[in-house]
Image (cartoon, rainbow, N blue to C red):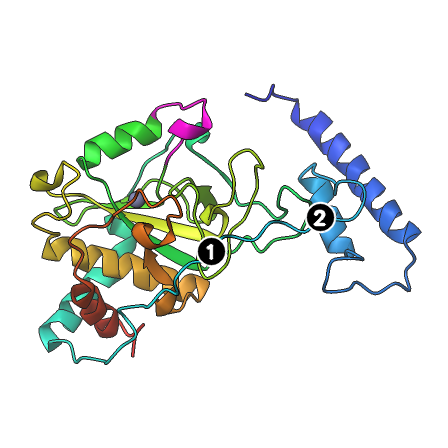
Amino acid sequence: MTPRTPPLLIALAGASLVCTGLALWLARGLMTSPSPSGQNPSLLEILDDVRRGQPAPPGSPKPAPQPPAQTAWRSPLTDACVAPEPAMGQRLRDLSAQLNKRVNRIRIHPSNFSERQKKDAFGNRIDPNPRVIVLHETVYGLGSAINTFITPHPHDDGQVSYHVLIGEDGRIIQALDPAKRAFGAGYSAFAGEWVITNRKVGGSINNFALHLSLETPLDGEDDAPGHSGYTQAQYDAMALVLADWMRRYRIPPENITTHRYVDLGGERADPRSFQWNELKERLIALDVLC
Ligand SMILES: [Zn+2]
């Protein structure tokens, strides 16, 4: 835990840091225009670094290692379009109108998530905006997942979270604000991209991912290749959340993927028994697909 500092001291320190940032920028010469490669950061970028207390490391950024080759992701959502039943469209629109009221927000332990980083471990600027959605399943019940997230985990290997959990009854639990970085996937990559924020841990998609997990049915509490699947209420609720994220962050449907696909360790198989057609029909009904 960081010791608490009186607000006045923070304000004074902040003001002096902002002044330092301004002076640094002026010293660089007002005629220098910022380059998109980040060689000459803009005033806003410098102030941003100063505000976060993370000045750029001295020297030039070093190129970050690239992820190993992966087979290309083939999205089951982007093949032929289908017409959803009219009743489904009406049902989902009604549910969508109450989405905010239906979301249960919980507060998880800070050791199980972090801020989205704007620089990698090598000093390179990185885009912290969410641009891939990863689907999971909980394997054990909702209560077990929530309990894990609210429990402090001091070591990297125990830290875990998803942004949203969907219960078997269609309950939507927001465990983490999408603006924050959930620890939903370890060693992972998507479309040739990962981010290394900790050299000891290796690359991961977490910095630019949104994670959603479906509660596994009781007959799936094992490592068998499949189970009886997810409920209609779960597919409805997940479609509402995904449509909201797709609109809010402009995420294309081909960037909705699975933990199984992004995992580079070859250990994850989730979500098992997932019916892409159930999701596809609903995303079409919600006007975010086709
Ligand atoms: Zn998973």
Name the residue carrying label 2.
62
Secondary element at image label 2? loop
Image point (61%, 48%), residue name: 118
- Compared across the picture, whether 39 is left or right of 82 comes to right
Q: Is residue 143 magenta?
A: no
Q: Is residue 188 visible?
A: yes
> Mark 1 vs mark 2: which is more N-terminal?
2
Name the residue carrying label 1.
130
Image point (74%, 40%), residue name: 55
Q: Name the spot of residue 113 as percent of width and height, x first.
A: 45, 36
Q: Name the spot of residue 222 as percent of width and height, x first.
A: 14, 36
Within 10 angstroms of label 1, few (less than 14), some, or many (20 or more) residues? Answer: many
> Does the CB distance between marks 1 and 2 fall below 8 Å?
no
- Compared across the picture, whether 118 is left or right of 90 comes to right
Pick the residue in front: 81 or 248.
Answer: 81
Q: Report the predominant secondary structure element of the magenta stretch.
A: loop
The magenta region covers: 151-160
